[in-house]
Image (cartoon, grey):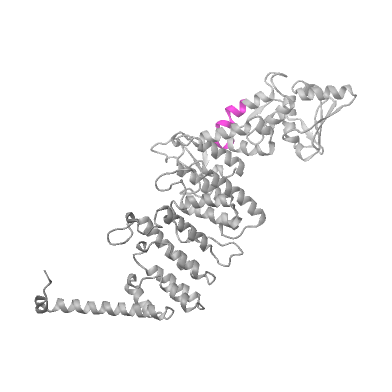
Amino acid sequence: MKFMKLGSKPDAFQADGGGGDCRSSSRRYVLSDLPSDIVVHVDDARFYLHKFPLLSKSSLLQRLIVEASQGGADEVRVGGLPGGARAFEICAKFCYGMVVTLNPYNVVAARCAAEHLGMTEDVDKGNLVFKIEVFLNSGVFRSWKDSIIALQSTVALLPWSEDLRLVARCVDSIAAKATASPGSVVWSYTYNRKAASSDEIVEARRCSSSSPAVPRDWWVEDLCELDVELYKRVMVAVKSRADRVPSDVVGEALRAYAARWFPESCRRGDIPAVEDDACAMEVLETIVWLLPSDGDGSSPCGCSCQFLLNLLKLAVLVGAGELLREELLDRIVLQLHEASVSDLLIPAKPPAQTTYDVELVEALVGRYIRRAGLDDIDGEDVFETNGEADDPSLLALCKLVDGYLAEVAADPNVPVSSFVGLATSMPESARPSHDALYTAIDVFLKMHPNLSKVEKRRISSLMDVKKLSKEASIHAAQNDRLPLRVVVQQKLKKSEKKHLANVDAHYTQDPKTTKQKKLPR
């Protein structure tokens, strides 16, 4: 951490009860042979000081003291001072020439207070504003972590920190470093997400044969401590230098920030408390707004499908608006086939009776199908000559849908219409095997024992017994939960296969018969 010492005289500030820490007392004074001749009120604190040091440095105190003297008073009040009594104490010590230590934690408050007090070059050369600017430019803004610390301190000092462009300068400093070439990173940074152990601080060095290369996302974790408004400003500045920061790195930054700030209840999939709800909504809106508009071929928007679906889960839990949900849905459908079944287990919000939001997943799959142009089954570009889907993404999606059906089938509150609607959303050609679908059907029938015969036939008709494996066929033929017609079909299929196998064996084992049977020419 950078710091700068100003002044050379010993610190003579005291508080009631003695000691140098004046922050715990409302009455503060300077040890001196000269009695105090002016009292300065700052918030609830009273400073018993001397006029001459203050008059030589501060134009505001000059005016206030003159006005008080003309009225025969020896007390002045400094109202609205940014940083309050602590910042004033720094400025007062500077007026006395006492030792003052500036650091990233107090420099913004001191800068704002000095500006308010008029401690500029017009009053005295080498005044406090000038000294602080030197420290900011030569120390704080050259340091990665000091710039972040200074930026965090600006929040309590608004609007002064904004008007003096301290916020903007901190943001520019951070963004410039985040977008620098990894090979030029020579400062320390936090990196705990991969090989680094917990709370390990990695000292980055120039790439060489003796030191590991700095990862492209080295800057991600340190920014996670910023509140959402500051984070948004920094990320906008980072994204404006898009030629230097790949979309997948921006996506990783957003994922890390979400992991840091989303309430634990939301990450578990629970409905958050009211106070968590507001926090999560603000973070969610910011992250979605910051999502990259493009990406590489593997991740169209620089974010994984799993991360986007987690955002969608949160959007459902906190009751996000339709526009935000639509934005997420549009991004998810671009890579829905890359999701896992657990990613799709989005909790349903009351008053829904089901555990998971099946209708939302059905809407996602429908968007994917329409976007791929598969709602018209006759599209020849997705089929091979054998009638099976030629698109591996479509095959992966169908496998995902069947796995999801098996999960939600265990919920007795899932209606037949939802189950059938999702199962039939996929083109028949995308399902070369019906084993997974049969598993889902069997679970659904088991967990819905009170279905009517019509409903059972409707559910069972979703599968094609000809596309079942040998093991699934044996199970289906003995499954008393299936309607009788399906069981009979399965037994006929088994009998037919056995008959064909016997015929094949007969012709294979009898050479004479083989010679007598000639294929027509």
Quadrant that contains the N terminus: top right
Between residues 176 and 361, which one lies in front from this camera angle? 361
In the displayed structure, 258 sits above or below 477; it is above
* Quadrant containing the C terminus in the rendered view: bottom left
Identified at 40% across, 48% down, the residue is: 298
Q: Is residue 107 visible?
A: no
In the rendered image, residue 143 lying in the magenta stretch gets the answer yes
Residue 261 or 243: which is nearer the viewer? 243
Q: Is residue 198 magenta?
A: no
The residue lying at 57 percent from left, 45 percent from top is: 286
Q: Is residue 214 above or below residue 32?
A: below
* SS majority, magenta: helix
Residue 13 image point, x, y percent: 77, 32
- Is 449 above or below relative to 109? below
Picture residue at 34% right of the left edge, 71% below the top? 468
Range of magenta residues: 134-146
How far across and down, in percent of the image, does residue 242 sit?
Answer: 47, 37
State the image coordinates of residue 221 (x, y, percent, origin top left): 53, 44
* Residue 105 visible: yes
Q: Along the horizontal axis of the image, is 250 left or right of 91?
A: left
